[in-house]
Image: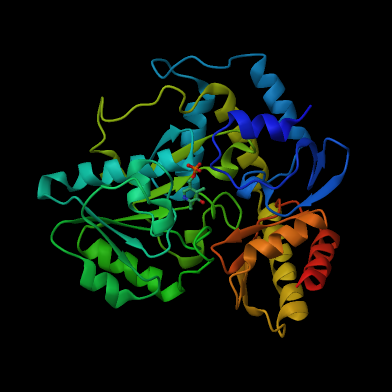
Amino acid sequence: MDIIGIDRKYHLQVYKRFPVVFTRGEGVYLYDEKGERYLDFLAGIGVNALGQRHPEVVDEIKKAADELLHISNLYYTPSQAMLAQKLAGLSGLSKVFFVNSGSEANELALKAARRYGMKRGRFEFIALKNAFHGRTMGSLSVTGREKYKRGYKPLLNGISFVPPNDIDAVKEAITEETAAVIVETIQGEGGMAILDHDYLQDLRKITADKDILLIVDEIQTGIGRTGRIFSYEHYGITPDIVTVAKALGGGLPIGATIFSEKVASVMDFGAHGSTFGGNPLITRVALKVLEIIENEGFLRNVEKRGEYFLERLKEKLGNHKLVKEVRGRGLMIGVELHDPVARDVAERMFEKKILIGVSGDYTLRFLPPLIVSEDEIDRVCEVLEDVL
Ligand SMILES: *Cc1c(COP(=O)(O)O)cnc(C)c1O
């Protein structure tokens, strides 16, 4: 069957896809129609944190499907309540709402921030240049790259964009109407810029002093990716709102918005809702995913593998004429190039049956499953050196 032809005829052509049809996966490997094997260092853009066919995840899906798929949020289910309790505990925040994607999680974060700011007429947001927060109208409005917004204006008004790691720029951008500041600690789509330790601490202090909410988008960085459940733990701060999605469902679609008590208190009956959000099957699987990832040994291993990967890349590519900088945290690693050829490099890697991502035009992005081995890391480093 000509799957690629059928897709081109019937699916909206909004993705620049690689020419491969995958039919099966196992751990860090994917297999195409012909049985050819690919080493997956993108993990569904950070979704497949435990790789493909993790036995405990597969088992949990089967058990859950045998019990209850969906009921609606007019009733209670054990797994939804327990997942909310778990995420509140892990984040140091108070209350959780479940959605189906990252964009929706951010959409709710923005809605809640407006509702919190409403009594003082605060409705504006500050976001970072090159930020990516999603594709819905609200989350797109705080996304800091024009190419995603072309043709969709007018979006939300009252948004200002400031460069990452410039605390004076934030101070200047704050007005009487500022409701919240939204940041990613590492810009996954926007070039892998990493927030400085002092910057995020200062940002927390400034926003707390003025009762402006700090929203940390952990959709890509969260759930173990950087060696902690939440990447803001590296900074010793607590946000007012945290959003997660990608890795949380182990491959199933789920997002969550996590709130401090003061924000949660403005979200009363009828303030928000979702038909699918927090369905019993997915919340049960997410509990299993967290049970595996929150283990201290597991997270230490992510940290160790990440350090190993970073060292190997620096050692092999540090002096390469095409490479500007290698940086990352845990297993979220970027290689910034001097030329806008990231996509070409990803295509050459694909020809060598290794899947990697890009982050903007200049930066290669590596998000391997968190269960990756040193041998697999070595292999990717060798092939990458060759390709460059
Ligand atoms: C992927 C991503 C989103 C959007 O998530 P979707 O599930 O695609 O809606 C938002 N923010 C960040 C940081 C992301 O990486």
Position of 281 with respect to 244 (left or right) is right
Percent position (x, y) of residue 306?
69, 65
Q: Tell me the residue at 61%/49% (across/down).
A: 45
Q: Nearer the viewer, residue 265 or 17?
A: 17
Residue 161 vertical position relative to residue 147 in the rendered view, above or below: below
Q: Tell me the residue at 39%/58% (across/down).
A: 146
Q: Tell me the residue at 70%/71% (across/down).
A: 310
Percent position (x, y) of residue 69?
58, 17
Residue 221 vertical position relative to residue 310 in the rendered view, above or below: above
How many numbered callouts?
Answer: 0
| The furthest residue to the right | 35
- Quadrant location of the N terminus in the rendered image: top right
Q: Tell me the residue at 79%/63% (across/down).
A: 380
Residue 332 in sight from this viewpoint: no
Q: Nearer the viewer, residue 287 or 4?
A: 4
Residue 59 in sight from this viewpoint: yes
Image quadrant in which you'd find residue 199: bottom left
Percent position (x, y) of residue 216?
41, 55
Q: Nearer the viewer, residue 302 or 46?
A: 46
